[in-house]
Amino acid sequence: MTEQANFVHLHNHTQYSLLDGACKIDDLVKLTREFGQPAVAITDHGNLFGAVEFHKAAKAAGVKPIIGCEVYVSPHSRLDKQDARGIRIHGERAYHLILLAENDQGYRNLVKLVSLAYLEGFHYRPRVDHELLEKYAEGLIALSACIGGEVPNHLLHGDQAKAEKVAGRYREIFGPENFYIELQDHGMPEQAETNPQLIALARKLDLPLVATNDCHYLKAEHHKAHDILLCIQTGKVLTEPDRLRFPSEQFYVKPPHEMRLLFSEVPEALLNTVRISERCNFDFIYGTYHLPVFDVPAGQTLDQHFEEKVREGFDQRLPAIKARLARTGNGNGLEEYEQRLQMEIGVIKRMEFSGYFLITWDVIHQARLKGIAVGPGRGSAVGSLVSYCLKITDLDPLEYNLLFERFLNPDRVSMPDIDIDFCQRRRDEAIEHVRTKYGSKNVAQIITFGTLKARQTIRDVGRVLEIPYAEVDRIAKMIPLDLKATIADGLKEPELKKLYDSEKHIRDLLDVAKDLEGLARHASKHAAGVVIAPQEITEFCPLYRMTNGDVLTQFTMNHAEAIGLLKMDFLGLRTLTVIEDTLDNIHLTGQEPPDLSSLTLDDPDTYQLLCEARTGGIFQFEKGGAQDILRRLHPDCFEDLIAVNALNRPGPLQGGMVDDFIDRRHGQRRNKSLLPQIEDILKETYGIVVYQEQVMRIVRAVAGFTMGQADDLRKAMSKKNQDKMAEIAVQFLEGAAEQKINRAKAQTIWNLIAKFGEYGFNKSHSTAYALLAYQTAYLKTHYAVPFMAALLTSEKNAPDKMVEYLAECRDMGIRIL
């Protein structure tokens, strides 16, 4: 064992100790690796929010991750919600205890404890008690924690007998080899007083010792930033004498040599950190799926029932399909549908996702039976013929040349992602159906975390430092107006860089803000995400209860998916509510509402309204950018609306792509043919790569890529992964050579892909949302009063919108009583 590797940090608070943790996970792991330590633990206050993120980061860095938590232990029963006596360090009303998962059973028990602490024991803090600890002790290693722990706290208050009794109780609960007396030294007089007593107690009861540092920030120089974070979280300023503050400046991730100096007299306490780390061997398993059980009729398998439902749906869609084929004169078109359907069914079965599609079908089917409005689809699922047959989506993917492989990659198993739009007013009914069908304990909504963004962090730090608001606001506004913009991005601007270099108080402000930006600030409920598990969710993932009673997963959307849980997005879409209310209003006027599902998409009056950009209340087309494109483009077919949705984004607008598209649309710029193989692919967009699906088709036609390889390129482009792009470029040119395509031409086509492809948009999503735009425009054109009444009702709590829509009513000659 190297000198550096003879100590492991087992008591660390990351940014997910939301009040007082300032260790960013990636930085903690990086520092651990720099120290040459083999492992590191995460022990956030009362939660496991960061467990999956931490595990992934540590594994990627070659550091063993130890999953743990600093739980709060009630002095009495967790069910006692009176103002319990107990430790009151940092205003807390319960004792601390460190728990580390030794194995899979330990992790499962830790999940149970942390969940029940919120669901049953919450009182100021999520609390467990001795009863729960005894029930879920297996597989856990416990450390007696800081001065806030039950054992050291009794010693601090002179009650040695009670400390001895409690230590004996923990030894009984966890086993003598699994309960450690924890020693810390942050230069605090309380620790100087209790550490000798803790050592003596450990010797008397034959309990092992372990040395830790209660790490809340990474380095000693981060103390000030951490102190300011405490002020931000508690609404204080730095000069207030009576505020939350840490008792010393030593709550950082100390290098091993500092820990050896502090605990040189008890070397076994250092060595035990390594021994504990060697015992802890829990790993999350990625790439497996825990889908809920979908009951199928007796005598049928899941795959058989899935195919039966798909075939039934195809038969129901067949009249509309045949009518379209007759209009286009495509006599052999049904063969194409049958081949596509067979291919998709085969892929879905092979990937073992039949259950997923049936679960999604059932949610939407039940919603429609209850009269809940469901959107026509969103995202890449619109490219699936199976989804269309199951009425998960309402657009024929073959009619609009949409790709299944943009949705599911047959070359690589990854969970499908079907998001569903519901009427905003009735979305909760759809979630309730899921709870009823799969069990309330098997379903939960998903947590998300607000983070300290660059501009807000500067303002928060400025307030704590009591710098005049006007000055702080001026500095904050020098950061680019982009949610992803960082303070480092702002410092690339000459004006801010000059202030940073010349004004010390500005430099101090920005240095602290840089340390804090990106930290998690608070937990909240994801707007749409719902997890459905085959068993109680706490068999896989811990739960969190918000103050309003909502129960959420402790893992975010991506992390819940990473451990194999089914995540579905149930979105409440106000536009669907407006459409439903418009149809009801039409009915109230004595008219028969139109059947939107059978609208032809070629109404001239509707396109005239769009060309004039009279788009208040028109889905996706209300704002200035879309209105400008509509005025200039003069759309006269549905394909134009699909393109407007795809083009109305910062990349195409700023890169000149929109101007180029409009010029070509009106014949003011010639569309040069590069290669016969790609002419048909780019014909609908006048030679410009507008859609990601076009990129996928081009590389297949020119370089012989499989659709799986083409989807890999699409992902690399969307993530702007230049290394991956360079690697794929080589494959593309080699593939083109095999197809006997001139290298210069192949390079030109690659350049075209690289230039426009990174702006390419998901055509499947754009098509579905173009349909909603058309439907709302149609209703506004032909049923203006019912539509505007529904629109005004939907915005009754938005004064600015009300004023805008009332003005539009006047312009349309609609009287407002």
Image (tube, rainbow, N blue to C red):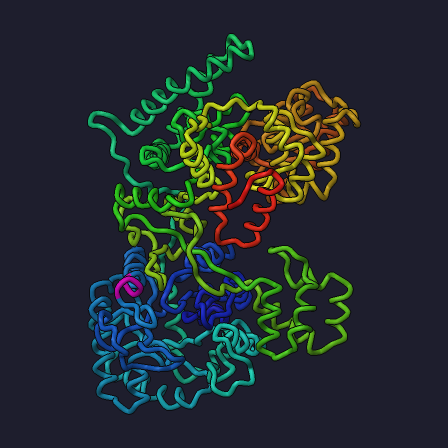
Task: Using the image as rendered, state which of residue 781 and residue 188 is in the foreground.
Answer: 781
Q: Is residue 596 left or right of residue 804?
A: left
Task: Using the image as rendered, state which of residue 679 and residue 275 is in the foreground.
Answer: 679
Identify the residue at horizontal 74%, vertical 36% (top origin): 659
Quadrant placement of the N terminus:
bottom left
Let me know if residue 416 appears in the view.
Answer: no
The relative height of residue 280 versus residue 70 in the rendered view (above or below) is: above
Q: Is residue 248 magenta?
A: no
Let me know if residue 167 appears in the view.
Answer: yes
The relative height of residue 521 versus residue 268 in the rendered view (above or below) is: above
Image coords of residue 116 (percent x, y):
27, 62
Which stretch appears magenta? 116-120
Identify the residue at horizontal 63%, vertical 60% (top origin): 486
Q: Is residue 513 left or right of residue 587?
A: right
Task: Using the image as rendered, state which of residue 69 and residue 300 is in the foreground.
Answer: 300
Image coords of residue 606 (percent x, y):
59, 28
Majority secondary structure of magenta residues: helix
Image coords of residue 408 (percent x, y):
47, 33
Identify the residue at horizontal 44%, vertical 37% (top origin): 418
Image coords of residue 288 (percent x, y):
37, 42
The relative height of residue 763 versus residue 320 in the rendered view (above or below) is: below
The relative height of residue 221 versus residue 391 in the rendered view (above or below) is: below
Count the labels in the image. Answer: 0
User: Residue 391 lies in what quarter of the image?
Assistant: top left
